[in-house]
Structures are given as C-alpha cells and as structure tokens.
Image (spheres, grey):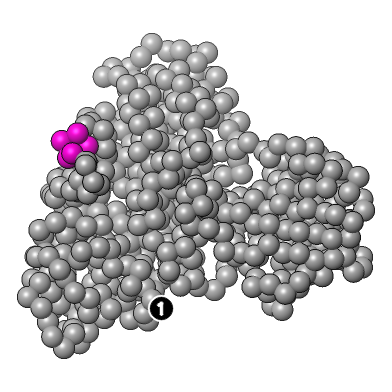
Amino acid sequence: MLTFDRRSFLRQAGFSTVALGMSAPLRALADARAAPEASGVSSQAIRTFLAAVASSQHEVHSLMIVRHGQNVARGWWRPYRADTPQSLYSLSKSFTSSAVGFAVTEGKLKVTDRVLDFFPEQAPDNVSDNLRALRIQHLLTMSAGHAKDPTPLITREQNWVKAFLALPIDNAPGSAFVYNSGATYMLSAIVQKVTGDKLSDYLRPRLFEPLQASPIRWAKCPRGVDAGGWGLSTTTETLAKFGRLYLQQGQWNGRQLLPQSWIKEATTFKIQQPATAPGSDLALLKQTSDWHQGYAYQFWRCRHDAFRGDGAFGQYCIVLPKQDAVIAITSATGDMQGLLNLVWEHLLPAMRDKPLSPDAAASSQLQEQLDSLTLPLPAGSHSSPTSARIDGRRFEVESNTLGAKHVAFHFNRDACKFELTTAAGRFDVECGIGRWADGVTSMPGTPPEISGLVGLPVGEQTPEKVGAAGVWKDPNTFQMQWRFYGTPHHDVVTCRFEDDRVQIEFRNSITTLSGGTHPETRPVLKGGAVARA
C-alpha cells in the first residue's frame, strides 16, 4: 500500500490553462554534458538510485542531475518525454517568488509593503488590525495569519482577491507558519497590479527567455490572474535551469538576472514550521523531516543545507549549494519524504569533492539505462477471443452522471481505439496493446486533477496528451492504462464483457495514492450492444 502524504493535497490544482508561446523556439537539451565521473559523480551510485526507485513505491517520471554546470544524468520514463511540459503543482510558488524578486529589483514594490494598499477598492467594510498589518513578506513566508489554508474558500468565488481580504485573519501576521496557497495567489495579483502584466508575461523576458525555456502554461483565476501558487507547467529541463540560476546566485550566461542579495534573501531561513501532529516533537522532526527545516520565500529549506521548490505528488527542484548541484525530479508519489530520502541516501553521497577516475563501463551502462527508462506496461494477455466478438460493436450506455451515451471498441493486432460519445461529441483514446500508444484526448473527466477533489471548480476540458496501453486481464476483461504525461496522473479503465453487456469502471491515480480517501467521482458505465459502430 502506498503511503499517502496529505501535504500533497494542500497544493491546489488550477483552472483551464492557456499555452504561452516563447520567442525562442523549443529546442533539444543543449547544455554542456559530461560523463558523471568528470564532475565528481559516481555513475554506479546513480544506477543504484534508479534501482532503488524501481523497487520502491515511488513512480518517477523524469530525472536531471546537474553538477558543476554539467548535465551528468537525465532520463524520462516512457511514455513521459523531454519536450512535454509537466504540471508542477506548488513548485509554481518558487517561480512566483522570483517574479516578486524582479519587481523588488525594479523598484515596483518592497516586501514590507502592506497588502491592503494594493487593493483598497477590494477591502472589506471593517478592516481588522491583522489585515491592516499584513505585508508582502508575510505572504512570501506563509505567515499571513490564517488559522488554515483559505484557498478552498477563496477559489469558490469569482473575485479571489476580494474573498482573500474578506476572510478573518486569526493570528498576527508573521507569528506562525500555515501553508497558504491563497497567499501565493495574492503575490501574483500584486505583481500584476504593479506591472500591468500577468505573472507569466512579466517573467517571460526576465526569466524564461534568458533561460531559453520551453513554452509554459499557467492556470488562471476567473478574472485572468495567473494562479501563482499552482498551475504552472514546464519541462524538466526548465526546472533544472531554474535551479541552476539560483545555484549560480542569479547569474546566467554572464548576466545577473536576479541580484545575489535577493537570491540569499529568498532562500534562507525565515520561519519555522510547527510540529502540528499530536505527540510530535519538533526536535525529532528536524532530524528526519524535510518539511521542518524552515521556510524561506516560497522555497523550502532541506536537510544537508539544501533548499528546494516542490509540488504535490513529488515535483522537485532541489538545489545543493555545498555540492554545486541541482536535482530536478517529476514523479507521482504519495510519500514525498520517502522519495527525498532516496535522494539523500543514494545521490548525495555520490557527489565527491574531486573528479573521479573514469569508469567507461559504468558510465556506458548508466547512459543505456537512462535511454531505456519506461514505466511498466500493464501485465496480462495481448489477445482474447472476445476482441473479435466486440470489435466495432457500439454499446448503448445507461443514464449516468458523466453524460456518456455510447461506447465502442475497435481492435487490431496491437491496438484498441476506445470511443465514448456524449451529447457534446465523440472522444477517443488510442490504446496500444503491449506498447504505449501516443494520442491526445478531451475525454470527460480526464486527466484526474486535484482540483476536483478539494472543492475547487474545474475549468473547461482542454486536450491532453495521453500515452495508453492495454491488456486482457482475463478472456472477458480488457484493462487500459491512460497516462496523461503532461501531468503526474493516470487512469486505469477496466472493461468487463458478458454476453452483449459491458461494464466500464474508471479509477484515477489520485484515488489509488490516497488509499481511497479521495474517491473516484466518475460513475461505473453499464450498457448493452446495439449495432456495429
């Protein structure tokens, strides 16, 4: 059973997203590369880390290790791939912090500015002393003073700024750490207010273009403000570059993008996270927990004098100044601490002070392993007599909350096309049999997103890239795995056939990771065959 980390669900998902094109074209990874040993990293230790991941409950989707400015290891577990932006969830917050840094540098605001001064027209009728005392630095350090994260409340409204300012602030700002994605949204709204640009547009010429980053997208609120605390999608390469920018004290290719003073201010200890679980001891937690090392400006402090940005389900940008290294990881795990533990156990000691003796065999084996990474294909048979019987049949579906009216299956030698028809039209998923098949779908209810599970409204359905594979679990049960490789998530879709009847059950990966705490909301579809499709 996977261990579920409830902190993951504090990182809110977003609304529908809009792609943001960059002036520089999307290009292949072109930073300097080197054999790991030349940068003082053991190839064998990286292989040991990969083996530990493979035998663990963590599902890693991508890995990049940068040491002394060199890409020493990078890999993507198929069907994930290098050129597809990934949903970062709360790792978005560290990029929002950077936007605040640019605005401070340009004299557009100060971290000591009062939040209410930016939105006097949105203020409640009765302004409390705590609201009056709330400053940008309190938003940056998750110490706004709310008793709990207000995000699920404010995102039910059309005007998130007004809703945020109207909520009671129970404690004096700056007095206690309480994780608060709504506070990060307010930072985005403030940046937009003082610059006239959305966060993504403001960062484009200052951050993304200098890094030659791939295209990004960022979820928005109903009033068009980038969510800030969640909703950013970008590639693993961009994550690694972002980490390098901070590792290099704000320098990039000879330019000082952010002042060294801001980098230090943004990444050093500002406030201590409390020990909130009954019977927990902060001193003991500091020995084992990377969530109790202190918080900075939308960055977490780590053990080993490191810091990181992170997002739900294991999206990481880990910066290790003492080792002159950056580790970028995207994944799907319910135990974020457990995955970090593997990094500390295997990758941290792999980094030595001096170059290592060349190890051509280990380096070659590592590269071969990185080039062949793949998530396990579903286990089962590649064929069944049932496929010929149901091929091309259309099944009329009983009334259901998904709005599905018909489903159909089209089989050939190594693929199955699944079709679902609603009043809005027909939606397909091309599924490989014994292989991953690439496609794009707008299937209702996909991909599974945290937004629908914590009470946040969900935006309009947008096409998502999907890698799908299927097998016969028994002669009458065809099971598909749909991996939405722009997100950490996937669906398992189980289709059971009996005579001329079909039953289709959906199970999303968030439900699996949570042990059922956040149940699947899509109904079981039942229907009977009516004709050849």
Q: Position of residue 342 (x, y in %)?
A: 39, 29
Magenta stretch: helix, strand or loop mostly? helix
Quarter where residue 34 is shown: top left
Q: Identify which residue is drawn at 18% across, 85% down.
A: 124
Q: Nearer the viewer, residue 488 or 501?
A: 501
Near mark 1 (Cα within 10 A), the count class, few <14, some 14-19 or many ≥20, is some
Q: Nearer the viewer, residue 268 or 312?
A: 312
**Residue for badge 1:** 222
Q: Identify which residue is drawn at 15% across, 77% down.
A: 116
Judged left or right of residue 40, residue 391 is right
Quarter where residue 127 is shown: bottom left
Q: Position of residue 73 (x, y in %)?
A: 45, 30
Query: Measured along the vertical axis of the image, is residue 305 above or below residue 394?
Result: above
Magenta range? 281-285
Three-letter amino acid code at disc 1? Answer: Pro
Q: Identify which residue is drawn at 42% across, 69% down.
A: 456
Q: Identify which residue is drawn at 10% across, 78% down.
A: 128
Query: Measured along the vertical axis of the image, is residue 20 above or below residue 280?
Result: below
Q: Position of residue 161 (x, y in %)?
A: 27, 77
Identify the element where label 1 is drawn: loop
Q: Position of residue 437 (x, y in %)?
A: 71, 48
Q: Nearer the viewer, residue 78 or 151?
A: 151
Judged left or right of residue 482, residue 310 is left
Quarter where residue 533 is shown: bottom right
Question: For residue 309: magenta?
Answer: no
